[in-house]
Image (spheres, grey):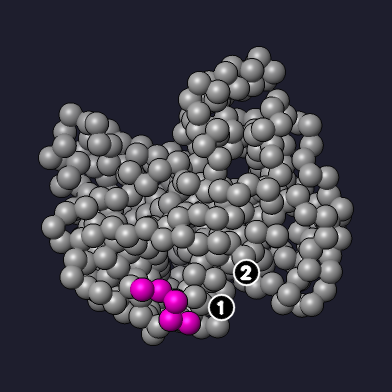
């Protein structure tokens, strides 16, 4: 941190962890019904080591985890907070700390760095063990000779997604319920540095934009009525992503995930009672999640919701982003007929950058990178303050 901000760390226990794969029976408190989970825990596809395929419900790090708060120095109780939601397969907060500082200084709000399920410190350390993951990646390449971008960085998450693609849904929903739980604990006066009557905005990067939009568009108990959502390198539907990257997913995992979520999802929902209950029945958060998977399906439903909040959503895209291209963000957020007035700013930097690392910290142009970062987050802060 610096002389203007300070960092705090707090613990949270996820009370929604029982939604995760590995439970045989689930009781939906919202509807007071029991649902038999008849789907297998995981298939043998992509399986090499059992310690990577530990049952999701059994991962203690995901159930008991830490989040971070960056607040203006000298401010004891914050009445305004801004959540930061990170990207897919992230393991530490290093690249986000300058972003959080910029937002905190630029708005005077406290910033919550909130980890998505099974990411950051919410995953077993073994999944980030470089030597073990390098060996696993080697074995995976032997098993799938045509695999693209299998690396020590993505092999654990790729294997888990490959063998059980529905993890994408369940970890996303758990993260949604965790944020709601956090908000309600704060509103009950249980946080030392956040006022009971606080308001919140959201800054979301990459796949974190899914979580941001589900929270905003569901607007559970009107918690997000006044919330502004800024999407950075984010905002397209899932089937318009290109996530095959040595830092995100390998090609085999991506094919399995696309096949599950896009090509065969309707048929899968007919067979999976629990998934169908959350995605097709009376859970608005699941229905909105469902609408963000395929650009063509549920388009009217999705676009009507986006239109309702068009002046509270803002997106910044990068011209050379190959993972979530600008034109796909525009297609989704502005609608098929361009009749949704969500502002989308496409930027380009006069240097090398990628979706995964827009502001590299080991570059030979530190002054230029700092200038670009300041430029982007000036836009972000102006959006929150207007």
The reply to whether residue 381 is visible in this rendering is no
Where residue 65 appears, x then y in whole percent? 50, 54
Q: Which mark is residue 343?
A: none
Q: Which residue is mark 1?
A: 220
Residue 79, located in which quarter of the rendered image?
A: bottom left
Answer above or below: position of 275 versus 228. Answer: above
Residue 185 vs residue 199, the one in the foreground: 185
Q: Seen in the image, is 114 located left or right of residue 357?
A: right
How far apart marks 1 and 2 lie (CA) works out to 9 Å
Where residue 280 appears, x then y in whole percent? 75, 66
Where residue 7 appears, x then y in whole percent? 28, 58
Label 2 near label 1: C-beta < 8 Å?
yes
Q: Which residue is mark 2?
A: 285
| Residue under the point 15% across and 47% down | 371
Answer above or below: position of 75 versus 363. Answer: below
Asked if residue 361 is among those painted magenta in the image, a careful observer would answer no
Q: Earlier in the sequence, mark 1 or mark 2?
A: 1
Residue 264 vs residue 14, the one in the foreground: 14
Residue 111 vs residue 271, the one in the foreground: 111
Query: Which segment did they paint magenta?
Result: 188-192
Asked if residue 189 is among those painted magenta in the image, a careful observer would answer yes
Q: Looking at the magenta stretch, what is its main secondary structure?
A: loop
- Is label 2 in a helix, a strand or a loop? helix
Where residue 138 appears, x then y in whole percent? 59, 17
| Residue under the point 69% across and 72% down | 283
Using a 10 Å C-alpha cutoff, classify the residue at mark 2 as few (fewer than 14 neighbours), some (14 to 19) or many (20 or more). Answer: many
């Amino acid at each position: 941190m610096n002389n203007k901000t300070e960092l705090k760390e707090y613990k949270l226990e996820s009370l929604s962890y029982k939604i995760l794969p590995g439970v045989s029976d689930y009781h939906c408190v919202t509807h007071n019904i029991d649902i038999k989970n008849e789907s297998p825990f995981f298939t043998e596809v992509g399986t090499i080591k059992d310690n990577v395929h530990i049952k999701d419900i059994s991962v203690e790090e995901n159930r008991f985890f830490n989040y971070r708060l960056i607040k203006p120095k000298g401010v004891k109780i914050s009445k305004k907070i801004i959540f930061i939601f990170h990207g897919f397969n992230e393991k530490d907060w290093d690249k986000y700390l300058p972003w959080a500082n910029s937002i905190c200084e630029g708005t005077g709000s406290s910033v919550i760095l909130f980890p998505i399920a099974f990411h950051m410190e919410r995953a077993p350390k073994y999944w980030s063990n470089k030597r073990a993951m390098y060996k696993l990646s080697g074995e995976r390449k032997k098993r799938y000779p045509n695999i693209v971008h299998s690396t020590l960085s993505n092999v654990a998450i790729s294997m888990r997604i490959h063998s059980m693609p529905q993890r994408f849904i369940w970890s996303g929903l758990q993260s949604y319920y965790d944020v709601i739980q956090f908000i309600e604990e704060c509103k009950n006066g249980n946080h030392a540095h956040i006022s009971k009557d606080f308001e919140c905005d959201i800054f979301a990067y990459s796949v974190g934009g899914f979580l941001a939009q589900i929270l905003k568009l569901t607007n559970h108990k009107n918690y997000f009525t006044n919330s502004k959502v800024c999407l950075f390198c984010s905002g397209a539907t899932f089937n318009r992503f290109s996530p095959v990257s040595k830092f995100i997913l390998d090609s085999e995992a991506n094919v399995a995930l696309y096949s599950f979520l896009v090509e065969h999802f309707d048929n899968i929902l007919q067979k999976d009672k629990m998934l169908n209950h959350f995605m097709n029945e009376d859970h608005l958060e699941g229905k909105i999640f469902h609408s963000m998977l395929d650009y063509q399906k549920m388009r009217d439903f999705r676009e009507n919701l986006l239109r309702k909040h068009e002046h509270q959503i803002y997106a910044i895209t990068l011209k050379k982003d190959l993972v979530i291209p600008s034109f796909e963000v525009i297609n989704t957020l502005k609608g098929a007929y361009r009749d949704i007035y969500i502002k989308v700013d496409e930027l380009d930097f006069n240097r090398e950058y990628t979706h995964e690392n827009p502001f590299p910290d080991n570059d030979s142009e530190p002054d230029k990178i700092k200038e670009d970062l300041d430029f982007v987050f000036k836009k972000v802060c102006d959006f929150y303050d207007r």
